[in-house]
Amino acid sequence: MPVSNLRLIAVSALLSQIIIGCDSDDNSSKYPDYALVEKLGDTATAENASESGHGFSTPIPTLTDDELAQHLTGDAHFETAFTTAPNTEHPELDGLGPVFNNQDCNSCHQRDGRPSTVTLSTDQDRVLLSSSAGIFLRMSIEDGLCDYPDADNDYCNNVGVDGFGTQLFHRGVLKARDDWEENPFIGQANVYLSYESSTFTYPDGSSVELKKPLFDIEIPYDVEADEQSNSSIMQDNVRFSPRNGMPVFGLGLLELIPEKDILALEDSTDENADGISGRANWVFDPIKARDGDDTPISLGRFGWKASTPSVRVQSLGALRGDMGITNPLFPDESIANTALHESYLTRTNNEDTGSDIYGEPEASQSFSDDVVFYAETLAVPARRNIDDEDVLTGSILFEQTQCTACHTPSFTTATGELSIGGKDAPEALKGQKIYPFTDMLLHNMGDELADNRRDFMADGFEWKTRPLWGIGLTKTVNPAAGFLHDGRADTVEEAILWHGGEAANSRTLFASLSEVEREQLVSFVMSL
Amino acid sequence: MFKKSCLSILVSVTLLSACGSDNDDDNTSFDFDATPMITNLTEDVIVAGYVDLNTKAEAFVAAITTLSTDKTEANLAAAQQAWKDVRQPWEQGESHIFGPVDSLSIDPHLDSWPLNTSDLESLLSTQDSFTADGVRNSNDDVQGFHTMEFLLFGDGVEDNTKAITEMTDLEIEYLSATAEVFNGYTQDLEDAWLVASDANNDSSEAYKDYLLETDNEIYSSQVGVIEELINGLIGIVDEVGNGKISDPFGADIDSTDTSLVESQYSWNSLADFTDNITGVQNVYRGEFDGEADAAGIIDFVDAADSELATRVDEEIATAIANIEAIAGSDDLPFRQAINDADARVRIQTAIDSLSVLQTSLENDVLLLLNEWNVQ
């Protein structure tokens, strides 16, 4: 269908809906039912913080006193910067790395939101990822798709790169590498970021400049500098996927969305022929495996590809992976048994084995519990400007452009005796009518966003629908933050324009709106 | 064009009946023109503080340069004093940790704690020379304030008076490189507020403009700016009372932990804490100590409740006085005070006064935003 026709239909539908709305006695009926909802997290919505950069950082107001105390303890842990072992003054803080991506949680989740996007000055072609970067690369060996996890296929776990693993740790402690005197503080390899530019032109002739990050890898530790092409990570069958930090509020609520309600939205073969599939990612669950479950598989809910089942697995996986801090759920270093780790241990007299002198992991059980609880119990910011006429009109356009086909507005969290990550769930998370604007499912997002890397059942084109709640506060929390899995989009508008695959139709509908209408739709999204 | 106009009118009409001020009929609501206050706090408190920080960072670099060219006791003392001087605006600025100081990762670059003494000592024992580029690409825990403090003052266990004979040429070289990087970040911070929030994008707004002209991608209204400022005050009062002082203080004299004391090498801890709350006072009052009266949060509070405005001002002054009183007649540094029975009583008094202040800010001042008739 020509774009001009699509636009005409969209505008006609919009007008008819408005006019129908005017005949109604109920002022709210002309808008989608979510348009006038202010508290997106129900009683788990933040109070007196949703207009400012504190919007992602407040505890759920209905926590008990004991829960609030644990949350605040976890808050301090979230900002804890780990150091090189041994640290005789602060043994509780040592064990960093020896290779890692950042030293504390906050660096990739600044003020509990997104990290700063790395930018280049006009005289730079590329920039080295260092302590200011909240992005890293996952990697694995290409081995085809995985239909469903079971013991025979190693539960669809990705195959790590020999000598490296499944995540490229671009930073290190001082002596992480054999060649540390020439290359101090460098991890498995250096990673450089550059950008490829393109232009999106709307049917009305206006345009938007877009940028896509590209990554170069240099001086991998496993080969000499003049033999880099021989490195394990430089081979053609290695797939990389950039991963930007994402906001950490509201996660406990997402974990308590009933599984059946998410699965009810699945349409993997697009039986309703709306062009939208929606697939669950069934993933390996380390908590079930630890507890002896014969089928350690759970619905993936967190991460860019829904590859982790719980806040606990996600958080403690990041603690061990991103920072190199072993913990009770992940007691072994990510790089255990690699040549890098073996030589590091030899060179440093086995100071950083991943266990302390009592054989315990670097982060204690209580530290782990507290930091997980913190991420589970951060409140959802309230909306702003919900009475603004552009915002209200934007809600109708949001519906018209079929954004809600994937960005499912609302769920109600489960009630009763519940566990979250293997622990009793706080009452404050239960029975909440929430508005996260995600269906929690995977969707093919097209070639332009594809990372071409499988992650459990997710293929190289699929990404989990991101929640939209709080998205309008992104720049308030961190003015340098970007959107999408690699931070490529500076604005919500750019993020929409990168939508492809199943979302291409919505992008086309958006692009065919007038400039005013596009701004209204974005205003609605920014009010969330 | 006609369709758009019609649509706009339709929506506007229905909105008029659906919406209205929450506060119009509420006798607790109040009016306040926030523009002069936001302008003053942005220009003459926040930005002025960062300009002062950068100026003193330049002076610090100069002091280190002098020390490196003329290694004398007097020049070491001057460098130590220059470190304390530049520390002051930084600590006062912790009452408004938002914007570029966070988005540019300047806070961790400048003020990471704890120091990674293991890597620092390895560097000093294995490397022949140091450059600013090398330090810049190092981890945050071997650069910034506390690295420079450790090199200038020693380990702080017995004293904070490192002798020039204890300082190696290589340490001074590392100091020089670290000071240069440090000053680069303070310049970045000043530029981000005054020139362009993204140094790599000339067309990006100066960060101060986001506060001065709201209805932008950062602050949708002045409510957000004031909420940011008040929550910033709450944040640092909480951090000083429940973290910086309470953590090393411990539950009793047998559970103290001097390793947790901030600025323990220079024994500047009490000055740090005092400056933190002085920073609260600066934002609350709208001016630095000794300057002419200007618009601050106190005026916002006063418009709603003059008694509360005065009470909070007094609570801030009391908290500052109680922190300063911790040293006592013996002028104890904080790392010794936590292990002194008499001083512990004074410390508890300071903690209690910070708790009172925090409660007022959270339960009284912040909630005024709900009563304000935004203009």
Image (tube, rainbow, N blue to C red):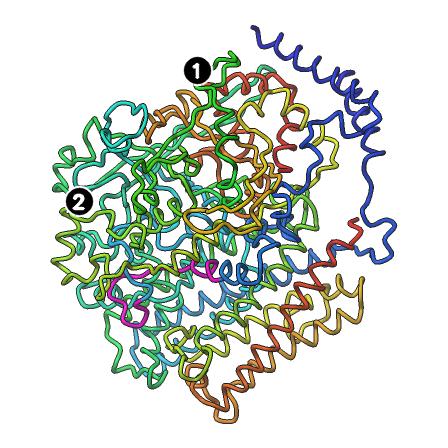
Q: Quadrant of residue A143?
A: top left
Is the N terminus of chain A in the top left, top right, bottom left or bottom right quadrant?
Answer: top right
The mark nearer the N terminus, 1 or 2, is 2
Q: Label for residue A221?
A: 2
Q: Farthest residue in the bottom direction?
A: B329
Q: Residue at x 75, y 37 (%)?
A: A387
Above or below — where is B8 with respect to A49? above
Helix, strand or loop at label 1? It is: loop
**Disc 1 from disc 2: Cα separation:** 44 Å
Query: How many neighbours does mark 1 have within 10 angstroms: few (below 14), some (14-19), or many (20 or more)?
Result: few
Residue A77 included in the magenta stretch of the image:
yes
Q: Disc 2 residue type?
A: Tyr
Q: Disc 1 residue type?
A: Thr
Magenta stretch, main secondary structure, is loop
Magenta residues (range): A73-91
Residue A445: give x, y in percent of width and height.
44, 23
Residue A196: give x, y in percent of width and height.
39, 28
